[in-house]
Image (tube, grey):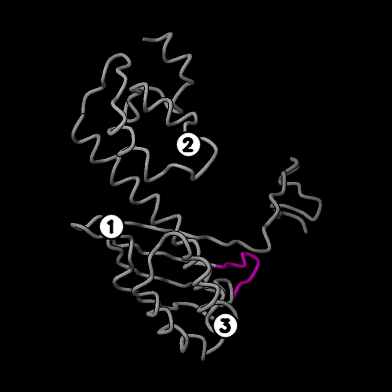
Amino acid sequence: MSGTTGANAHGTHDGHDVERVPLPVHRRTLNFDAFEEGGDLLVTAYLRDERPWQTDARAVLHHMQLDVRVRKSDMVITAADAAMHSFPHAECPLIAPKFGELVGMRVGSGFNARLQEGFRGVSGCSHLFELSRALGSAVFQSVMSCHARARLEANPEPRPGLHPLPSDVVDRVVAPIRGTCHIWSEGGVAETKVRAGVDLNHGPYPIPTLAVLRNLD
């Protein structure tokens, strides 16, 4: 058609090649926000399943929300509320109150097994179950963030040099995270750095090897 511009079927635009960006057929997003309130953590979790190619209400296939209150001292869930903002069937939200049964569960060893028993499959909703399952690591990271912020508030300025720490201090810092990954294995890389007095809250990030830090000392 004479006088028209725009991209044609061959991906050109006004005579220039245009690289086509492929549109995903599906996008899943998990989002967690945690807030410290006294001795508790308030966690709001969202799951969204989107179909970017869809042009009607089904473009957001699932939009689920899970709000929990967790007591930091023992990691026990003291309040839980689930909601569905977008869902495929009118009856889907009928299962949301089931997730109030998260109250009383401790986020820690055995948490995933209890979720499997009580909330997976026809006993619950697969999407709210996925949010609940991911809650464990999100709560753990949130508690670690609370500890890091407390350390930073207590020691706002960088600590020059390496100053070995006594074992009781090392254990207090390391115990909550010991054994969670290869870096935090007992006596491993991270624990050795803490024992050597590496300042975890200041300096370069990622934290360099202990050999590099000793050369900087």
Pick the residue in front: 25 or 69: 69
User: Do the CB atoms of the residues marked 1 and 3 lie less than 8 Å apart?
Assistant: no
Residue depth check, mark 3 versus mark 2: number of the one nearer the observer: 2
Give the prevailing secondary structure in the magenta stretch: loop
Q: Quadrant of residue 72?
A: bottom left
Side of 16 where 137 appears, left or right: left
The amino acid sitting under disc 3 is: Pro
Residue 88, disc? 3
For badge 2, the amino acid type reads Glu
Proximity of marks 1 and 2: CB atoms separated by less than 8 Å: no
What amino acid type is highlighted by mark number 1? Lys
- Quarter the C terminus occupies: top left
Which mark is first along the chain, 3 or 1? Answer: 1
Q: Quadrant of the N terminus?
A: bottom right
Query: Residue placed at 81% from the left, 51% from the top?
Result: 10
The Cα atoms of the two marked residues, 3 and 2, are separated by: 47 Å
Assess whether residue 55 is covered by the magenta stretch. yes
Residue indicated by mark 1: 72
Residue 139 percent across, percent down from the top left: 38, 56
Q: CA distance from mark 1 to mark 3?
A: 36 Å
Disc number for residue 141:
none
Residue 197: % across, % down: 33, 22
Nearer to us: label 1 or label 2:
2
Magenta residues? 49-56
Q: State the residue at coordinates (29%, 62%).
A: 42
Q: Which type of secondary structure does the marked residue at label 3 adopt?
A: loop
